[in-house]
Image (cartoon, helix red, strand yellow):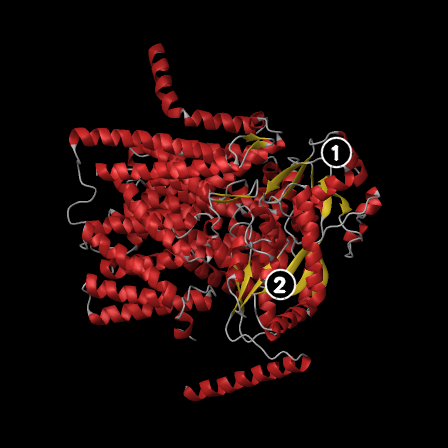
Amino acid sequence: MKKRFFVWRIGTAMVFSLVLIAISMGTAAAWEPTKPVEFIVPAGTGGGADVMARFISPLVSKYKLSPHPFIVINKSGGAGGEGFIYVKGKTKDPHTIIITLDNLFTTPLSTGLPFNWQDMTPVARLALDYFVLWVNEEAPYKTAKEYLDAVKKEPGKFMMGGTGTAQEDQIITVQMEQAFGVKFGYVPFKGGGTVAVELVGKHINSTVNNPAEGVSHWKAKRLRALAAIDSERIKLPLWDTIPTMKEATGVDMSYLMLRGIFGAPGITKEQQEYYVNVMKKVTETPEWQKYISDMGLKGAFLTGPEYVKWLEEKEKITKDLMAKGDLLKK
Amino acid sequence: MRKAEIVVSLLFMLVGFIVIADSVRLGFMWGRTGPASGFFPFYLGVGVVIASLIVLLKAVNEYRKQGEGKPLMPPGALKPILWVVIPSTAMVAIMELVGLHIAAAMFLGFYMRVVGKIGWTTTLLVSIIAPLSLFITFDKLFLIPLPAGLWGGYLLRF
Amino acid sequence: MMEDLNNLMMGFSVVTQPYNLMIIVVGLILGIIVGVLPGLGGANGVAILIPVVVTMPATAGVILLSMIYWGALYGGSITSILFNIPGEPWAVAATFDGYPMAKGGRPGKALVLAFLAHGAGAIFGVVILTFFAPILAEFALKFGPAEVFAVMMLTFSAFVGLGGKSPLKTVVAILFGFILAAVGMDIVSGQLRMTYGTVVLMGGFNFIVAVIGLFGLGEIFLTVEEGLKVEGISTRIGLKDIWEGMKEFIRYPKAIIMGMLIGCWMGFKPGGATPASFMAYGFCKQSSANADEFGKGAPAGIIAPEAAAHAAGTSAAIPMITLGIPGSPTMAVIMGGLMIFGLQPGPMLFKEHADFVWGFIASSWMGNILGFFLVLAFAPIFASILRVKFAIFMPLIIYVCAIGAYAVNNRMIDVYYMLIFGVLGYLFKKLDYPIAPMVLALVLGDMAEQAMRQALIIGHGSPLVFFTLPLALPLMVAAIIIFFWPVIAPLKARLFGKKA
């Protein structure tokens, strides 16, 4: 028994050291987790961020990117605020990382939570979420221009449904109102899937759902995609048939949502680099490639100073739009 | 019993007032698109205050007329209840230091031996096997890390 | 119909492959464990397995996830009935009559009744899922926020009769439940309510934590009060219990049918299993000739909510598959699992991945039927815990409750809340503040308020939105009639009595 255990130990040790060598040859990162990594999700189970975290965690194990597993933990209270505060409190703890969406900016701005993304260590941007303007297939509007013209005629009559309050969907609504001089009524719901179904059931007039939230109803000819809310067309098969906002209305408009990773505050350069490498390797796997195309995401890996710069700009834009929409905490 | 009745209804009233205060801050009127954030809590608070005020007045009235009445707890009940409440609160407090499983092991051992007068063998067996198997189920199989406390992480390293 | 049957047969040929069968059994056993442990809910249980599942073939993976769910649906009522601690939120209503019956010396019968009710609800739900899913999906689309609010009102009015002796205290308890539900983020306005700047209160009060404290710990304090003399109850479950349970079960066809129908409806829109079980319990009690027996171990009080819970749990798969909206939190996680496999839930799933859908439906048949026998086989093991000396078993229960309270949200503060709710539960029982309506208010408060405010935004601030045809108006009227039924019924009797 003892002997077998010994052999097994040697075996694993050899495998691990091979992996170690493989990793350290590729990079110069010397640090590695010495215990399981807490992978915080500042959202409930089943949502976009949660599914992504639970998708990444087995890839980390499968490709042996870490000697210890990444354990997904949900801390969803207060639109994710609980998760952010938790990570902020984990100063210098290299075994905590967090996956975030745009609630990284919107939650503290709208609630006055004592938190800013600079309280954490930026690791990488993994992908970006697209948004599409949808109406019911039976609605008389064939193009975004027709629809927005109709909205303009009767301010406040048309109902835009979206996920949560003072979060990305409402910010896009504000952005649209600013760009086109229109006024929507905004109805918040709990999740993107629900929003899409409320539109199919004609309880609301339009949504700015993500591709993944609307795709099935679109294919079933219950929803109509009027425009992709980005400056370029969505570079995925089928989705590239949707015109951009500029093509559909003549006014350029773009909003993309962050899917990024952060570490605890005050971790060392090596620890930060380790996670950057893990995430880079994750985004290079074939599983990941299939995943983002299935989910209708924009693969946009970004790290280092460029990532920080992007975050700074994104924060500024978000704050600006929220101020215009009167969504900031007073 | 009636004293407890009075105290509890006063507590409810206090909760009601706290809620009303915060609702006023949030705005409790009918907003542009329907009720504002504090609309429901405001009326909930008002409702609780009114209802518990009536409960309070009734209880005070009865207390004046008929005295304390039936005790809240049957005689001699307080002791066994405190023997549960205090150790379990202690367990939760110790959890912050040594983690959930170790605190629970201590709690199990203490309660069984000191309060329950269970034999040493059973006490030891249960207070070791139960936390160990729950540790394996939650922390290892289901990968739900339960609180390790300040030092628990160092004590349980496997 | 014929085509459906053919497809179903094809599905069965997939799930009866040895590998898939093995997965079904493993998944069910894990699910029952998940169900039995309070705090480790179906949603957590499924979420935890997603990383394991992504390495498996799609059909097998989704079968494993759904088996956890079916197992958890069955397992939840075991802890409710034996220890008065709901293992799952939908099993809260099982404590109302299941625990009194078990405490009265008939735990075997209570369990068998609950399992039979679950089995009946499951079969009904699966039949609906197999043959009527697309039709029901169209019906579900008719439910907007106003209709959802009307359904919530219906649930509350069904619960009006469940108060304690003092109506005033019932009002206090309900309002207190609503207040607890309102703490934290208000999703409609995005504002924080009653948090006083603390991060701790941002997450609000979790329903499961409250229930573990109020029911579980509260009950322990009540038991301890009688001293430590509590002897274990004889809890061997023999064939005789099963036979007796079956005989008893078929004596309550009304409770069974009521549970199945309410459950199915609430499952696909809009409430899910937890409100379904409450609603079925409330309606069954109100319409029962011997309503006084409810709460003291009435068989119908076990059957109706349990049948409803499982029927709702099963039919929650309908909106998930056909519309891409999960009918319950667990279904939300299962849906996440589907998306990882590139299976986009929604109206196209039936067309694009028919083989997968029918495999899933066939596995629901297998899972729910096998689950019944498995849980029956497991019950004696759990029941035997009751034979253990109280001084050993009681601290163990507190330990498990603490784990449960923590695991719900991974928060230490919830364990403290649990202790406080335990003391509150004891005080409430003593002073006759009813707990059940309070818990209902806590679980539905958020949902009801959200639906109401969403509807008002859509209706531009006018409350008339709740009285629109075809659905909201009749539902609201029904809710109002049932609410005032205790007043109307004697009136009606008097009127007709005079005429006669």
Judge from the rendering whether residue A4 lies leftward or rightward of residue C363; answer left or right: left
Disc 2: host chain? A
Residue at screen point 58% across, 73% down: A268
Q: Measured from the top left, where is residue A114 in percent x and y?
A: 54, 53
Q: Nearest the camera: C338 or C310?
A: C338
Q: Measured from the top left, where is residue C416 in percent x and y?
A: 37, 54
Q: Nearest the camera: C128 or B15?
A: B15
Q: Vertically, is C483 above or below A195?
A: above
In which quarter of the view is residue A31 placed? Answer: bottom right
Q: Can you identify the residue that label 2 sits on? A: A261
Residue at screen point 31% across, 37% down: B10
Disc 1: host chain? A
Q: Are marks 1 and 2 on the same chain?
A: yes
Q: Quadrant of the N terminus of chain C?
A: top right
Q: Is residue B13 visible?
A: yes
Q: CA distance from mark 1 to mark 2?
A: 38 Å
Q: Can you identify the residue that label 1 sits on? A: A151
Residue at screen point 21% across, 30% down: B62
Q: Quadrant of the C terminus of chain C?
A: top left
Q: Nearest the camera: A9 or A114?
A: A114
